[in-house]
Image (cartoon, helix red, strand yellow):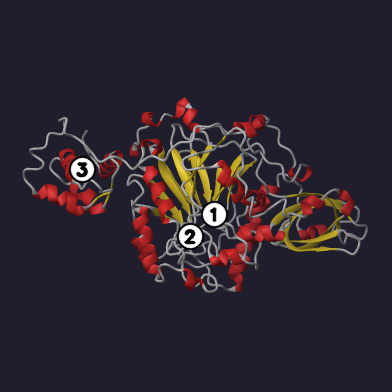
Amino acid sequence: MPLESNARIVSELAKRGYNAEREAITLLAGASEPTLALEATVEHAPADALRITTEHVRAVLDDSRSVPDYDSGSDNNTSVSTPNEIEQNTETVDSSPVEIEGSTNHGNDLVDGDSHRTESDPAESDPAESDPAESDSNATDDPPRDSLRDPSRDPSRDPSAHVRDPDRRDLSVGNDMTGNSTGTGEYDDFVRTFRDRYERLSKVLRGRVNHRPAEAIASMPGGSDASMIGLVNDVRSTRSGHWLVELEDTTGTFPALIMKDKGLADVVDEILMDECIAVEGTLADDAGILFADSLHFPDVPRTHRTGTADRHVQAALISDVHVGSDEFMADAWHRFTDWLHTPEADPVEYLLLAGDMVEGVGVYPNQDEELDIVDIYEQYERFAEYLKEVPGDTEIVMIPGNHDAVRLAEPQPGFTEELRGIMDVHDARIVSNPATVHVEGVEVLMYHGVSLDEVIAELPEEKASYDEPHKAMYQLLKKRHVAPQFGGHTRVAPEERDYLVIDDVPDVFHTGHVHKLGWGKYHNVLAVNSGCWQAQTDFQKSVNIDPDAGFAPILDLDTLEMTVRKFA
């Protein structure tokens, strides 16, 4: 077939099990007969080569006999074999849990190449929308237990029928603040950030309550019905066991009292400082306080309908590679990238990496004792080499994390030009944390996940825990903000726009950071925390972190079903 573009050359090499250096691709594209040059290069490459280098191509092009004498249609047209496929476990998995919760389940439920698939819950077809404040605050739309099946038994997922066609791909990025930072750290910058947060999230809530500004409520007569939307300025318990919540809007503050006999205790447990909520109730006789009858979060509508791709294509969702650490699992990474070169992985045309590409330097006490590579630039150079193992025609999107060499305050820009140059592999898109990635009709919200620590620390264990990180993600979806609480462990950078607000409901919410594998559906949004590629460090032992390492969630973009593969 004619090779009219660099992308076609990359695709053809990937079919033969090869990556390639950028200059090698350019040389092939510039050859007088690109197809013959490619075939000759593959023919003459060393048998153990996985990457086509510039030297391989030049050796062929410089030999005047190599291309003219090569018959691309002859029986001698061979290519190196792709790496061994990971052996498939074909036993039924119907008895396994839908959401793998904690590493204790992984050893029994997932083996090399084994997989679990989740599907949408048929019960979600009811279009009626309920009031989040009146419903079970933990209600989710997780798929039923019997929806798991072995994907190798699904005839519609025949990898031999898949054709990797770069021309059919559709990928764009939104909410990328790289190069657009405006904050100087001045007080007015913070005011602008929180004003923007309030204005955008209050619009979501105004359709649910008859909002009045704080100054207007203060002038209303006692006994009046009133509703207010505001940022949570304070939450405290009274001696009688009630809760006093102070809300702030652009006009001032006003207190709301939530009585313990109103049945709202479960909702109060979920309130975080600085998040935007709405309260409805009745003013006291002296109009000095609002007795709350209901409380609303911005939340994700139960009627949310997801987008899907119009063809069978997949995305691998990974995070927390931590190259440079003594505990980086290189063997597991090699098994993963080897698998990506197999026919079974042909549909995996996208790789979405949610931060912490490297281990970093000075991130936690005595980290230097656990480093395999002590220079941060060498860490990124080594990471780039590992990334080259991914098929060259794979579309890659990466965001930074708290171990990466960017500012810790969120939103985090997508690296300096120097580091972007080091990681410029396969034309990877390096964007900010967070960012929204539009992939063939599916909206994926990528966020590294530092605020999950805050959510897990502040909320009851049944609502958020490290063993079930996806439930903490549900809370961020409910609050429509990836880092609502200011002044705690999560550092927030003041910008004219609050890039951490979840304006549009995503179809998939992808995070990392906590090194735990967990996934489930909340109001039809698939929340995925993808684990890590780093075994337990001494520091993690000291803080009781037992990581889920070497897993790769594989998302079907046409159905939003997910398969989790284990490579460790």
Checking the image for residue 512, the label placed there is: 1
Image position, residue 389 (x, y; %) = 34, 50
Left-right relation of 70 to 26: left
- Three-letter amino acid code at the position of disc 3: Val
Left-right relation of 70 to 508: left
Q: Quadrant of residue 94?
A: top right
Q: Quadrant of residue 523?
A: top right
Checking the image for residue 356, the label placed there is: 2
Q: How far apart are marks 1 and 2 (CA)?
A: 9 Å
Near-viewer residue (290 or 479): 479
Q: Is mark 2 on a helix, strand or loop?
A: loop
Q: Is mark 3 on a helix, strand or loop?
A: helix
Near-viewer residue (496 or 45): 45
Image position, residue 262 (x, y; %) = 87, 49
Q: Which of marks 3 and 2 is nearer the N terminus?
A: 3
Image position, residue 253 (x, y; %) = 77, 64
Residue depicted at x 67% and y 58%: 456
Residue that sits furthest to the left in the current view: 64
Q: Which of marks 1 and 3 is nearer the N terminus?
A: 3
Residue depicted at x 32% and y 47%: 392
Q: Is mark 1 on a helix, strand or loop?
A: loop
Q: In which quarter of the image is residue 4?
A: top left
In the rendered image, the quadrant that contains the N terminus is top left
Other residues around mark 1 within 10 Å, as few (<14) / some (14–19) / many (≥20): many
Mark 1 and mark 3 in contact? Answer it, CB < 8 Å.
no
Mark 1 and mark 2 in contact? Answer it, CB < 8 Å.
yes
- Three-letter amino acid code at the position of disc 2: Asp
Q: Distance between the residues labelled 1 and 3?
A: 38 Å
Q: Report which residue position mark 3 lands on.
A: 42
Left-right relation of 41 to 252: left
